[in-house]
Image (spheres, rainbow, N blue to C red):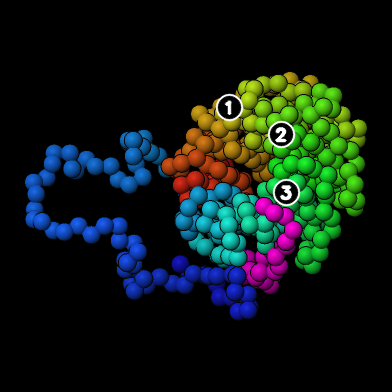
Amino acid sequence: MAAPSQSNPDHEDVDREGDIDEEDFFIEEDEVLEIVEDDGDHPMDEDDDNEEAPGTENGDDATYEDTSIQNFSSHKSSVFTVAAHPSQPLAASGGEDDLGYIWNVLTGEEVVKLMGHTDSVSTVAWSFDGEMVSTGGMDGKVRIWRRVGKDDWTRWEFLTELQGPDEVMWLRWHPKGTVLLAGSNDSTVWLWQLPSGNTMQVFAGHEAPVQAGIFTADGKRVVTGDGSGTLILWDPRSPTPVWKMTPLSARFGMEGGITAITSNPSSTVVVVGGAEGEVRVVNLAKGEVVGVLEGHQQGESVEAAEFVDWGTGTAGTAGFAVTGATDGKIHVWDMSTYKLRATLSHDDSITSINPHPLSTGKGNLVTSASSDKTLKTWDTRTGDLLKEHKGHRGPVLGASIGSFEDNVYALSAGDDGACLVFDAKL
């Protein structure tokens, strides 16, 4: 594939593939698996012509179905994370091969290879305006690239590397500014200002890996949760917690650790998911549990939590939250009553839940991803399954929803090394 030329040759961390010609098609010595001597022809066994193709063991090929409309195949091993650009038909992905990529979701072509990590790229995230993209790795590095010029979205340059964390577990950009938040397995949380790369805060109130964290929807607060079950509310301007909740706090009881956090649109409450199936609603002003949502199987980790906006236009409504767990269940919760409204199901663990943008006119839809190799698009108002997206040969480890012009698409990151694009317009 041909990729755009680089305007700044000094940035060696950005690599673009050249055109492929016939000279590229040869077998390297290290690609030879075994040399077999020719000892003559042999009669063909009756079953020889029925041998399964590679990757279709256990009869998978008989039931394999691919409904994707595009794919990206540059990763050489498991892909852990994928993120849709906020306004353009681009995606960023990262994987076990220590690489990140920016690629075009309409063509499947690589735009930029994001190099420089020395261990798996576990998380990627776009800035709110899509002008910068960040990659976080198990090597503790956070690397930032930014768009070059204003003519198009094909030219990117390496900006800076942010250091501090031991191992990066997640990245979140501020919803309205160029401020980046990162959680680490060393119990710290880091806040940086971009493009300068200056450290704004190092939050050090946790005593276990910080497994989940967010900016509240209004961007005024940070909420983080760790593997010991401690939840902390921070003011970004101060290294001192506003309040802290532990498993011993009234009705909280997250002994197994916190695995998911989401804020409602008005930034008044967060829904917190735990490793033992617990779901709690916490009032941010008071630091108190105001709701206990019971539905996930005990001992099954809550891997995803999101608020969905049905676009009712009614100010002050409590809204609806969605949680997904390793029990294969997705629960839709009415936040005005804290009652279960609907249960949606996969055949294996839920790995991701992605609300559709309200701008599509379908804010009531979510697309979920699962270890059962599929993604599914649901109507959270009715609980109806609207589309099932197939094409992976292994667990789907991450997913994202994007829109461009009249297109709505679901992006997936697979343990099989593939990123797929599905039509999610309804």
Q: Is residue 229 left or right of residue 370?
A: right
The answer, for residue 184, to whether it is visible in the render is yes
Q: Is residue 90 above or below residue 281?
A: below
The answer, for residue 322, to whether it is visible in the render is no
Kind of residue at disc 3: Asp
Q: Find out whether the residues at labels 3 and 2 contact each other: C-beta distance under 8 Å.
A: no
Residue at the spot 61% in from the left edge and 51% down from the top edge? 122
Q: Is residue 163 above or below residue 207?
A: below
Q: Is residue 280 left or right of residue 138?
A: right
Tag 2, which secondary structure? Answer: loop
| Residue matched to label 1 | 327
Residue at the spot 60% in from the left edge and 55% down from the top edge? 121
* Percent x, y of residue 370: 54, 36
Tag 3, which secondary structure? Answer: loop
Q: Earlier in the sequence, mark 1 or mark 3?
A: 3
Kind of residue at disc 1: Asp
Q: Is residue 139 left or right of residue 388?
A: right
Residue at the spot 35% in from the left edge and 64% down from the top edge? 30
How far apart are labels 1 and 3 at the CA level?
28 Å
- The image quadrant that residue 157 belongs to is bottom right
Disc on res. 408: none
| Residue matched to label 2 | 257
| Disc number lying in front (3 or 2) | 3
- The image quadrant that residue 227 belongs to is top right
* Percent x, y of residue 389: 49, 39
Residue at the spot 34% in from the left edge and 35% down from the top edge? 58
Magenta-drawn segment = 144-167
Of residues 299 and 295, the one drawn nearer to the viewer in this rendering: 299
Q: Find out whether the residues at labels 1 and 2 contact each other: C-beta distance under 8 Å.
A: no
Disc on res. 186: 3
Kind of residue at disc 2: Gly
How far apart are labels 3 and 2 at the CA level?
15 Å
